Image: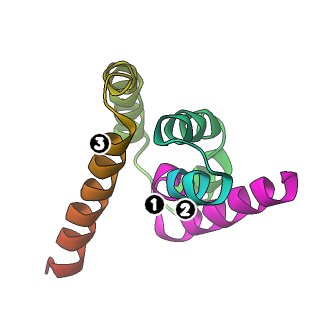
Amino acid sequence: MTWLILLIGLVVGVFSGVVGLGGGILFVPALVWLLGMSQHKAQGTSLGALLAPVGLLAFLEYYRKGNADVRVAALLAVGFFLGGYIGAAGAQNIPDLWLRRIFAGSLVVIGGRMLFER
C-alpha cells in the first residue's frame, strides 16, 4: 500500500508541475477510488499533503523562468489560509454524497469553461 501512495504522490506531482493543476483535484479522486477513503477523509488528507513546502521546488522552477508573481502568490496564500479554515469547518456539516457531488460539479463547470473559452 505504501508504494501505491508514493506512486499517487509522484504522478500527481508531475501532473501538477506540468499543467499547474492543484493537487487536490487529482489527490481527492485518487484517494477515494484507489484507497477507498470517504470524501471528507480524502479532502482532509489532500490538504495535509499540500501543506508547505510541498510545491516549493515547482514554484522555484517557475519563478526562475519569470513565470511566477510572488506578490499575487502571497496574497492568494493569505486568502487560502483563512478561506480554507472557513470552508473546512463548513464541509464537516455536508453529507459525504453531497460533498462528492459539489466537488464533481465544480470540476465539470471549471473544465467546461476552460475547454470552450476562446
- Which residue is labeled 2 in the image? 16
User: Which quadrant: the C terminus?
Assistant: bottom left
CA gap between label 1 and label 2 equals: 5 Å
Would residue 118 be found to the left or right of residue 22 on screen? left
Q: Are marks 3 and 1 in contact (CB under 8 Å)?
A: no
Q: Is residue 37 above or below residue 15?
A: above
Taking depth in this image into account, of 13 and 103 the one nearest to the observer is 103
Tell me whether circle 1 and circle 2 mark residues in contact (CB < 8 Å): yes
Residue at the image point whose x is 47% and y is 42% from the top: 39
Q: Which residues are magenta?
A: 1-26
Query: What amino acid type should be assigned to the residue bearing mark 1?
Result: Leu
**As rendered, which of 38 and 85 lies closer to the eye?**
38
Residue depth check, mark 3 versus mark 2: number of the one nearer the observer:
3
Instruction: Residue at 26% x, 54% y: name it.
Output: 106
Residue occupying the point 66% across, 37% down: 53
Mark earlier in primary sequence (3, 2): 2
Distance of mark 3 from mark 2, alpha carbons?
Answer: 26 Å
Residue 98 numbered tag:
3
Q: Is residue 77 above or below residue 64?
A: above
Q: Secondary structure at mark 3?
A: helix
Magenta-drawn stretch contains 21 = yes
- Give the number of the disc on residue 21: 1
Residue 86 location, x and y as percent?
Answer: 32, 19
Q: Is residue 15 left or right of residue 92?
A: right
- Whole-percent x, y for residue 43 in the image: 50, 39
- Mark 1: secondary structure: loop
* Disc 1: CA contacts within 10 A as few (<14), some (14-19) or many (>=20): few
